[in-house]
Image: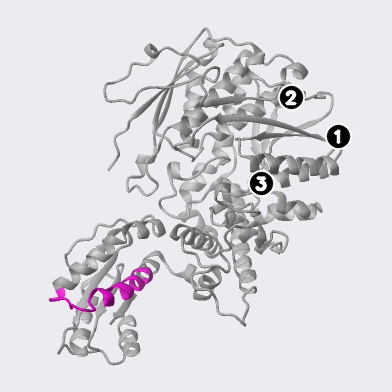
Amino acid sequence: MKAVAQRHIVLCNGAPRSTIRRKINEPEPLQLDYRNDHRVRLRLPDFIRSVGTIPDRALDLLELAAYVFAADRLTPRGKSDALILDSWSRTFHFAVKVRDINFWSAPATRAKLSELLEFISGDRQYKFEFVGGHSTQPTHLFDDEGFLLEPDKPHHVMLFSGGLDSLAGAVEQLSTTTDVVCLISHQSGQPSTVMTQDRLVAALSQKYPGRVKHYRFSTGLTSGRAVSETQRTRTFVYGSIAYALAAGLAQNHVTFYENGITSLNFPRRQDLINSRASRTTHPRTMALLGKLLSHVAGKPIVVSNAYRWKTKADVLQVIKDSDAQNLIPSAVTCGKTSMSRGDHTHCGGCFQCIDRRFSASASGLSEVDHVGLYTFDFLSEAITDPQIRTAIIDYARLGLRFRENSIDSFYGEWLAEISEAMSPDVSEQSFVSQLFNFTQRFGQQTVDALRNFSLRDDVTKAIVPNSLLHIIQQREYLKDEPERFALKLSVRLKQAIPVMFAKNRPKDENDFNDKVHGLIQNDHDEYRREFPVTSFGLAKVIPDHEIAKYNLLIESKYLRSGTTASKVTDQIAADIIKYPETAYLVFVIYDPDRAVRDDTVFIRDIEAKRKCMVAMIR
């Protein structure tokens, strides 16, 4: 089932409404103009005085990138728990007033723009109409920050976020070359981001005097919160800015630094597909951005990710080998810094924080990347947020899946991801071999991280339930999704059913089934957060309940007074052979009068017959 596509019209730089005909049922066009719109900020460093006048085509590119980024953030996607994944994908139709109308209106230009933006955003469609006649004075676009460039020296133009990956890239380039390193930073207005970048740049400048140039740019929204914070199009903005500076320095190479696990973004579960998975530095993104910038420049421009074959643990090793590990605590990797509190710079629960802590553990740098950086310590504190719990378990499971792969099973399981990431000009055999070895390394590092985490278990104290130490002790990451869901469900039913029937027992088994159904539906939202791919299509059929996405079948048994254990055993034996071996069975048995005398033997005998779970409730 696909959601109905709703087109979003965006008018930029005063492009007239008549450029795109609006249908009756479509929303009002979004009108963006940084010159007089208080919502949009487009402020860039002054390259003009020191580099020369930026060509009209490049100015158009910078404005276009800023408008796409603003529209991305101002246009809502579907809810993150929507069953229809297509609801997260949008359709955009832009009308933009530009200076170089002949270039932008050419079919080849529009095709390259659409291909890049549709891939990195995961949206259905990006269409563009261009109108000529746009002009501005340079001072309207650029701030005067007085950067002095020295084109006669070798320069390395790179993106610098202030995270571990870009910090490692800067340190490696400064310690192994004599280049002047030009750090391009986006400063969204969050004080913590500005402080992080400036603090790291100051430290690098002190260690490598005269070789660090920092170029800040601010592009985004000036007031109010964005309705969509996925920010999938930010690479278009970053790349455009970096290209403008590189062109002024007569450079033809723009470098990103992001570890390959993040760049390739292997789906850890089914809901992390399409626009739900970031493609910021995916190999195809780098290739498509390079093609567009080369088209704009009229000559080859190389856009690359220097760390595509490094894991986050490898990145930390680069910093350590460069004797810069003292900078690790100052680098901020968190994807939800607004959730950090007090002196803590990281929330501790987002995927970036999880990746960072696992990687620091694997590389033996947990003492440097200390727990004081994190608002939430998932190692020793109870994980009450189901989404954080899911993210941690998914992370561990992905590493273990990689580790268990042979090269043939890896190729079969990840064929779609391999095909999407592989360039047409490389040998498939060589690429698959390199990618396989890379994922094997990540898998081993995941195991190393879990082992090192477990060594921090204080044997004189009880493990906090639902902490990572508890998850490791229970080996929960080794359980498959149906079993994990069944465990969660059984705990909930064991808590709720005795309370529900404390005064009045069920009338019969149908009444009991109705109550079980209601409990599962009542906890729908919590289950969907922890198990996002679950489709709750429950119905009172045989089996009593079914969760189709997991091929999980639930049989409910109410043992009334006089029911014998042997009768229950016979009923369950009949159920076991009735359903296919591929299904995961859960038997929910409410036995208030203790018809079953020995739970251990009873459960063991049933669970020995096939893969299933027995939840005894009293």
Q: Is residue 72 left or right of residue 25?
A: right
Q: State yes or no: discs 2 and 1 in contact (Cβ < 8 Å).
A: no
Q: Which residue ends up furthest to the top in the rendered image? A: 133
Closer to us: mark 3 or mark 2? 2
Q: Residue at x 51, y 19 (%)?
A: 33
Q: Which residue is mark 2?
A: 145
Figure check: 417 above or below 142? below
Q: Which residue is mark 3?
A: 163
Q: Residue 22: where, in percent of width, then height?
A: 32, 19
Magenta residues span: 487-509
Q: Which residue ends up furthest to the right in the rendered image? A: 209
Q: Confirm whether residue 424 shows in the render.
A: no
Q: Residue 591: where, in percent of width, then height?
A: 24, 83
- In front here: 94 or 261? 94
Q: Is residue 430 left or right of residue 488?
A: right
Cα–Cα span, label 3 and label 2: 24 Å
Quadrant, the C terminus: bottom left
Q: Which residue is mark 1?
A: 210
Q: Confirm whether residue 165 shows in the render.
A: yes
Q: Main secondary structure of the magenta part?
A: helix
Cα–Cα span, label 1 and label 3: 22 Å
Q: Is residue 142 left or right of residue 2?
A: right
Q: Is disc 3 surrounded by few (<14), some (14 to 19) or many (20+) residues within 10 Å? A: many
Name the quadrant containing residue 576.
bottom left
Helix, strand or loop for disc 3: loop
Closer to us: mark 2 or mark 1? 2
Q: Which mark is residue 15?
A: none
